[in-house]
Image (spheres, helix red, strand yellow):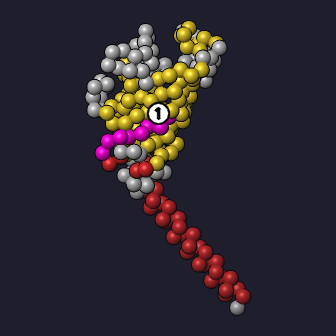
């Protein structure tokens, strides 16, 4: 009798494990990826009609190779415009808010801690969180999405970042962003 109960309990545990495994496989198979494309306007030096969106809050100590005005330890706070197209006059879709710092002593690489906050349509007020290293001299950089809120709650994914335009006199840049999100609780 004891063996019969044990065998029955083990059989139920195996059935439960099988059901859970099938549910997880089904959930993984149904995961979809949502793609967003926009441009980020990192305006260090203001010009008429184009205010600065970057504030340097700390100056580092050691100049970086090939960039004598950029130093290891420089920290910048940003509230950059996100637009549909590369022109700052194109339709605004959100803001990139957070900071970046030059965290490598021997190369141009920054550590980003940014929220991409969308301000249009059904994603208005939703945001994703980026925290990553960016080797800014590379043609394409991949940065992970580590979370989100609102319609992006539970999001994971990555962005592909490209420098669309860089002005070495003003240090102003326009960055092209392709963002791929998965594990969204609501799309």
Residue 110 visible within the image: no
Q: Is residue 117 magenta?
A: yes
Q: Which residues are magenta?
A: 114-121
Residue found at x 27% / y 28%: 90
Residue 120 visible within the image: yes
Residue found at x 51% / y 27%: 77
Q: Is 21 located above or below residue 133 in the figure?
A: below
Which residue of the protein is positioned furthest toward the right in this rendering?
2
Residue found at x 44% / y 61%: 26
Q: Is residue 80 magenta?
A: no
Q: From the image, which quarter does the N terminus lie in?
A: bottom right
Left or right: 39, with 133 as reference point: left
- Exactly how many numbered labels are in the figure? 1
Residue found at x 56% / y 28%: 111
In the figure, residue 105 lies in which quadrant?
A: top right
In the figure, residue 96 lies in which quadrant?
A: top left
In the figure, residue 10 lies in which quadrant?
A: bottom right
Residue 69 placement (x, y as % from top left): 54, 10
Within 10 Å of disc 1 (Cα), the crowding (few <14, some 14-19, many 20+) is some
Q: Nearer the viewer, residue 97 or 30?
A: 97
Left or right: 155, with 11 as reference point: left
Q: Is 164 located above or below residue 13 in the figure?
A: above
Q: Nearer the viewer, residue 30 or 113?
A: 113
Which residue of the protein is positioned furthest toward the bottom in this rendering?
1
Residue 130 placement (x, y as % from top left): 50, 37
Which residue of the protein is positioned furthest toward the left in this rendering?
90
Q: Is 151 located above or below residue 17 in the figure?
A: above
Residue 104 placement (x, y as % from top left): 61, 21
Q: Which residue carries the number 1 mark?
A: 97
- Give the secondary structure at mark 1: strand
Most prominent secondary structure in the magenta stretch? strand
């Amino acid at each position: 009798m004891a063996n019969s109960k044990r065998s029955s309990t083990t059989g139920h545990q195996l059935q439960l494990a099988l059901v859970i495994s099938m549910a997880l496989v089904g959930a993984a198979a149904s995961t979809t990826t949502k793609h967003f494309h926009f441009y980020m306007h990192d305006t260090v030096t203001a010009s008429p009609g184009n205010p600065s969106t970057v504030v340097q809050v700390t100056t580092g100590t050691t100049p970086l190779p090939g960039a004598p005005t950029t130093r290891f330890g420089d920290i910048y706070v940003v509230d950059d415009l996100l637009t549909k197209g590369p022109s700052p006059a194109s339709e605004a879709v959100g803001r990139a808010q957070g900071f970046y710092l030059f965290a490598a002593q021997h190369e141009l690489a920054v550590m980003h801690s940014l929220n991409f906050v969308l301000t249009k349509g059904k994603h208005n007020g939703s945001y994703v969180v980026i925290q990553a290293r960016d080797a800014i001299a590379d043609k394409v950089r991949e940065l992970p999405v580590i979370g989100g809120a609102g319609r992006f709650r539970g999001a994971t994914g990555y962005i592909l970042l490209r420098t669309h335009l860089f002005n070495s006199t003003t240090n102003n840049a326009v960055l092209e962003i392709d963002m791929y999100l998965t594990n969204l609780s609501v799309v």
